[in-house]
Amino acid sequence: MSASEQDAAILEIVKGKAEAKRTMALLEHGLRESAITLMAFGECLRSLNMASYAPEWIDKGLALLSPQLAAKIQEYVSADQRLRDLNSTAAKLGID
């Protein structure tokens, strides 16, 4: 591998790490906002008389939330794995 190819590979790793860190920060922010929303939703549910609400209404609300949260969490896990892979590669090459 030539010096210019090595430099290009190193630059790609550094850029990849920066992008992965940005992605993770955005996802962490989104997940925190989702958690706060769910906590507020839970507080409201605690104060309600749940017997007055049809179970279908509750199931519909949970079905709407679950796929979105699952997708965000899966995206976060993928971004975290990418960052760990890039960090490992960078460490092997002596890049920090």
Image (cartoon, rainbow, N blue to C red):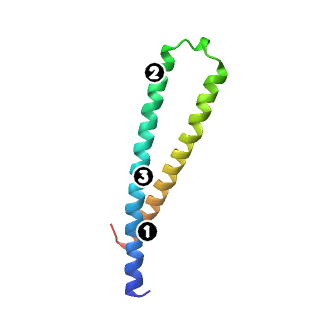
**On the image, numbered disc 2 is attached to which residue?**
43
Residue 37 in the image: state x and y as whole percent.
45, 31
| Label 2–label 3 contact, CB within 8 A | no
Residue at image point 61% right, 12% down: 51
The x and y percentages for residue 72 are 51, 45
Relative to 26, is 59 above or below? above
Q: Which residue is mark 3?
A: 24
User: Type of residue at label 2?
Assistant: Glu
- Residue under label 1: 89
Q: CA distance from mark 1 to mark 3?
A: 18 Å
Q: Earlier in the sequence, mark 1 or mark 2?
A: 2
What kind of element bears circle 2? helix
Look at the numbered disc 3 and give the secondary structure of its residue. Answer: helix
Instruction: Choose the circle earlier in sequence order: 1 or 3.
Output: 3
Gap between marks 1 and 2, in whole Å? 45 Å
Q: Is residue 91 visible?
A: no
Q: Single out the residue that lies furthest toward the left.
A: 96
Q: Is residue 91 above or below residue 57?
A: below
Which quarter of the rendered picture does the C terminus lie within?
Answer: bottom left
Is 50 displayed left or right of 15 in the figure?
right
Q: Which amino acid, by three-letter code, is at mark 1?
A: Thr
Nearest-to-viewer mark from 1 and 2: 2
Residue 82 visible in rendering: yes
**Image x and y of residue 13, in percent:** 41, 69
| Residue in the picture at 42% in, 52% down | 24
Residue placed most toward the observer, 66 or 86: 66
- The amino acid pointed to by label 3 is Met
Q: Residues within 10 Å of mark 2 (few under 14, many from 20)?
A: few
- Which is nearer the eye, 59 or 90? 59
Q: Is residue 2 left or right of residue 53?
A: left
Residue 21: x, y in percent? 39, 56
